[in-house]
Image (tube, helix red, strand yellow):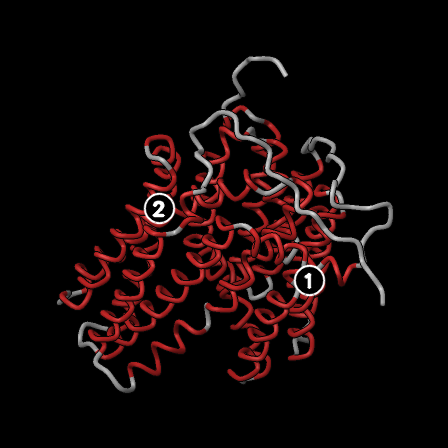
Amino acid sequence: MNGSPPLPLHRNRDYRRLWAAHALSAFGSQATFIALPLVLLAATHSVTDFGIVTFVEIGSSVFLGLPAGVLVDRISHKKLLLCCDLGRACAFGLFALAVLSHQVSLPLAVLLAVLNSVLGAPFGPAASAALRGVVPPSQLAGALSYSQARAATVTLAGPLVGAALYTVTPVLPFIVDGLSYLASAACVATVRLPARGPDPSRTAATPHFLRDLTTGVHEVRRSAFLGYTLVNAAVVNFAFHGIFLVLIAQGAAGDDGSAFHNGAIIAISGVGNLVGSLCAAWAGRVFSPRALVLVIGWTTAGLVPLLPLSGNVAFTGLIIGLCGLTAPAANVVISAARLRSIPEHLQGRVQTACDLIPALIVPFGPLTAGALLDRLPADTVLLLYGAVLALLAVFSSASKGLRRIPDLRETSVPEPHPVRVQPETHP
């Protein structure tokens, strides 16, 4: 390798196309986020049916996480991304035909949800693993910062565009969704990914697929840093999903209009997240990763207890916006350090293992908040969630795993030690 500096990200052709592919794929998903329940409700007149579809989609996504990680580590990232995009383009194209011919039904919507989960589960881990092939380690934080900004923008704009398309004609969001996946596939097809190195954990015989499912879990268990990232994500997701439910309940009980209250809080949080994403790369260059995570953790733990003091939506929005502003920097440095520290041949399995527990914890945040609201005042519940975040900040300060986080400001980092997979033994 020569000593010339790497290309800036905006001039890195392969990174730009991979970024665009992920943006188009995410935009397509968000565009139908509003349209799908409306189409299903119009066809079946049952809110329960939409609940079933949502449950199936979320449940299958979680269930398929570990198998998706194995596929990411066994199959060419480019081929896998293309298959996911083309498969989803076909699925949403066929569903658009069903909408056009007024043939939408619960079984068809459930089938779409399952296909979307099956094809979507490997896409994120494969795109993240491919990112390490087109971006040098010194630019990972910047690349992930732009990824956070992309996610924040798509989350804000996608549902609005989907709703606008639905008002033109109900089938239009699904047509646009299918086309977005085709456009994503076109971008992926032109990305040049380097050849992947050999997997040192493999013996001559490839391990059984089912046995390989737990490889990522074992790697997370033996790494203090990866274990810390799992705990951090699980607690933060649990707390903030609960906090948002409390704020929504407060808005519904207020006199200033629940729709405005809740919409304003969600919008301000999204804007804060977008601005924070754009600043995350700068923060990663200025502060050490451990210092940045600790500052953000303690800041968030200090902001949440201020929520009970809010008397109006502006103050609540300010607090939530500040939380949204700081969160992306922690996400970026942790994600970049994780990408850098995981061996190439384990990217898919370890990433999906790290995402599994936080995904399982998410539903318990609102569930716990709802149970507490039946027994305690909303302000007390918010203080309890603030205490949870304070405990996380204390845990982070003492965590050996966080002390081992790779410094993203270093231009060279030793290669991570590969996991050793013991050969199968039979009695």
Query: How many numbered discs?
Result: 2
Of residues 395 and 134, the one drawn nearer to the viewer in this rendering: 395
Q: Position of residue 12 (x, y in %)?
A: 56, 26
Of residues 161 and 399, the one drawn nearer to the viewer in this rendering: 399
Kindly report which numbered mark, 2 or 1, lies closer to the viewer in this rendering.
2
The disc label shown at residue 334, or none: none
For numbered disc 2, what is the local secondary structure? Answer: helix
Viewport quadrant of the C terminus: bottom right
Viewport quadrant of the N terminus: top right
Q: Residue at x 75, y 43 (%)?
A: 76
Work out whether mark 2 precedes mark 1 in sequence or the reverse, and give the earlier one: 1
| Residue 231 location, quadrant | bottom left
Give the residue type at disc 2: Val
Q: Residue at x 34, y 76 (%)?
A: 369
Q: Position of residue 328 (x, y in %)?
A: 38, 47
Look at mark 1 in the image and give the residue it sits on.
118
